Image (cartoon, coloured by chain):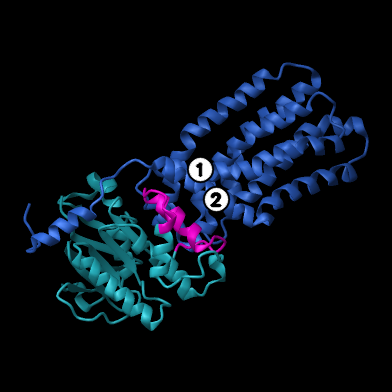
Chain colours: A cyan, B blue
Amino acid sequence: MSLRLQARKLACERDDRWLFRDLDLDIHAGEIVRVEGPNGSGKTTLLKILSGQLADFEGELYWDDQPMRLTRQDFLANLLYLGHAPGVKAALTPLENLAWYQALAGEPDDEPARFAALSAMGLVGFEDLPAGQLSAGQQRRVALARLELIPRALWVLDEPFTAIDRDGVADLEARLLAHARRGGCVLVTTHHELADSPALRRIRLGQEGDDAGL
Amino acid sequence: MPDSDPQPARELDALRLFREPEGGAGVAIRATLKRDLVLLMRRRSEVLNPLVFFALVITLFPIGISPDPELLASIAPGLLWVAALLAALLSLDSLFRGDYDDGSLEQLLLSPHPLPALVLAKVAVHWLLTGLPLSLMAPVLGIMLSLPAGSYAVLALSLALGSASLSLIGAIGAALTVGLSRGGVLLSLLVLPLYIPVLIFGAGAVQAAILGDGVAAHLAILGALLAVALILAPWAIAASLRISING
């Protein structure tokens, strides 16, 4: 068993335009892979393809050195995906939101762990307010608390820094690095400049000539 | 296996992070049930809307047609069933809409648990808070249409059975149209033809009860429809959601 997500000859076309073509990727344990590119260059689409949400693409995905279609269950059990929309229910409190995610991920019901995850995200005192009353940044923090709560090897994060304040950004960046150091793997799109580190690798999309350089 | 990571300690840690797909689907289903129940209980208006619609429509018929009890009694089964069916349809559009808008639907689809089971939980909540209240309310509205005594229990029972099928079939349409910003009309067009068998046997059961015929056959067919819907609809809903998200 190894943490390894590969893509071969990945290509995706949207509205008669190639977002990327012949994209080969090899993402493994201990790495932070940052997908870069201007708006509309297909970062979110690439993340959705790599997390197995879109079927409308060419090429092959491999997880753990086997084709994704054979190992999908296994892949999903190791994936934590955080999309554009935070996936936080406005009518539920942060604790209730996390309780659902915990159960959905197949983790045992653990209230202290949920409190701990929320306090790690700086949400002490907001646990029992409806999430709709929290600010955009706080709602994003509720979603990010899943990183703390649910142990998963592969993190796929789409613009996780949106609406987060400066301290929060530094904290999250440290969290990504710690995850990579622990042997996990992070795939992230962001416009925020990540500090250089040996674990960090960049993938650039939307360059002329469709060559996505690694 | 080509070792891509030079540090053995790191590999060890990675192994600790790894998860095998395991059980716990029951926990996920229960949590989804509970979450949706709590959500709907906090947005009462969404629960009350179909019930108010049902009551309003039924109140208007005696005023619009005629207060003659005999005439009303003869059309009451059909009226009650049609109004209940439309009320249930009215509430369907929001079944997956909220989850789609805030991103929880993506998360539901990425869960390692079987999606048909999870959506079945969502549909069950929809029935509990729409179909069941409608069927409990129908006998009260039946009085207003001077429905003959003796058919009230059959009315409630047929609606309870039938509305479960309606929720299941309607959820397929709701799943297919969740990605469209104005899917409401399309949803009705998609789903109404499939509702007709349920309507025929549901209204037929009440009619049979009024005439004093046996109702068992009608109810049995409603039950059979529900059984088929229970077996097939969850898969269809799951597949439809995948298609919608893909768009």
Q: Residue furthest right?
A: B68
Residue B247 visible to the viewer: no
Q: Earlier in the sequence, mark 1 or mark 2?
A: 2
Task: Kindly identify the residue that appears in the image at 73 percent across and 47 percent down.
Answer: B51
Q: How many circles with numbers are drawn on the protein?
A: 2
Q: Position of residue A65 (x, y in %)?
A: 14, 51
Which region shows up in magenta?
Answer: A87-112
Residue A182 occupies quadrant: bottom left
Is-magenta flag for residue B58? Answer: no
Q: Label 1 marks which chain's residue?
A: B
Q: Quadrant of the C terminus of chain B?
A: bottom left
- The residue that mark 1 highlights is B121
The reply to whether label 1 and label 2 mark residues of one chain is yes
Q: Position of residue B232 (x, y in %)?
A: 47, 34
Residue B219 occupies quadrant: top right
Task: Kindly identify the residue that appears in the image at 14 percent across and 61 percent down.
Answer: B10
Residue A101 visible to the viewer: yes
- The residue that mark 2 highlights is B36
Q: Are marks 1 and 2 in contact (CB under 8 Å)?
A: yes
* C-alpha gap between disc 1 and disc 2: 9 Å
Choose between B224 and A174: the one closer to the eye. A174
Choose between A178 and B74: the one closer to the eye. A178
Choose between B68 and B8: the one closer to the eye. B8
Q: Label 2 marks which chain's residue?
A: B
Q: Residue furthest front?
A: A112
Residue type, numbered disc 1: Ala
Q: Is residue A203 left or right of residue B82?
A: left
Q: Position of residue B68 (x, y in %)?
A: 93, 35
Q: Position of residue A212 (x, y in %)?
A: 19, 72
